[in-house]
Image (cartoon, grey):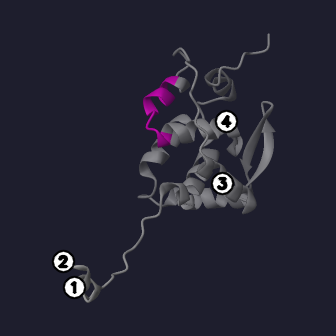
Amino acid sequence: MSSEEFAHTRFSFERRPTPVPGDLRITWRVSLILLMLSASRSSRASLAKLHIVNDAIRSNQIARLRDATDADAKILPWNLRVEPAFARAIDFVVGERLAEWTRTGGRASLQLTSRGLSAAKQIEKVDDALERERAIVFEHAKKLTEIRVSALLGERQAA
């Protein structure tokens, strides 16, 4: 096609939906954080614990998470990847007053507020939402204690 023919050719454009990158799907992450906190002891979890569970779910390291929560298994250090989108979701959870900052075992932690507990219960009522994630969280969140988190992060225990 010559440039002359090309110049006189009629074009049409059709708008198509643009997929939203996973990093921007904040609803999934907020729901996951609420489920992780509600499944944790006293609806509270350290930031490190939240990042470990999130990393296990995102990178499909469920067997590794299972080993980390098994009292008889030897703990190998976790190569933790801090995900910026997850950190933004945490900021959103705090900003919406679904959780508040506190301390657990000397670490920065989040604890669900009454509003957050209510939101988590609403998420739990939806049977077909976050099925895989919910199963993982409810099986492992309570078992992953702060002592185990410290061991996963390679921290030495005080004598």
First in residue order: circle 3 vs circle 2: 2
Q: Callout 3: few (<14), some (14-19), or many (20+) C-alpha neighbours within 10 Å?
A: some
Amino acid type shown at disc 4: Ala
Q: Which residue is mark 2?
A: 1
> Is label 1 or label 4 in front?
1
Location of the N terminus (image quadrant):
bottom left
What mark, if any, has residue 48 been given in the picture?
A: 4
Amino acid type shown at disc 2: Met
Cβ–Cβ under 8 Å for marks 3 and 4: no
Amino acid type shown at disc 3: Arg
Q: Which residue is mark 3?
A: 88
Q: Which residue is mark 1?
A: 5
Q: Is residue 125 visible?
A: yes
For residue 50, side relative to residue 123 (left or right): right
Q: Is residue 141 visible?
A: no
First in residue order: circle 1 vs circle 4: 1
Q: CA–CA distance between discs 4 and 2? A: 60 Å
Asked whether residue 60 is drawn in magenta, I would say yes
Magenta residues?
A: 57-67
Q: Quadrant of residue 120?
A: bottom right
First in residue order: circle 4 vs circle 2: 2
Q: CA–CA distance between discs 3 and 2? A: 50 Å
Task: State the residue at coordinates (25%, 85%).
Answer: 4
Q: Secondary structure at mark 3?
A: helix
In this view, the residue in front, 92 or 159, is 92
Q: Secondary structure at mark 4?
A: helix
Asked whether residue 29 is drawn in magenta, I would say no
Location of the C terminus (image quadrant):
top right
> Is label 4 or label 2 in front?
2
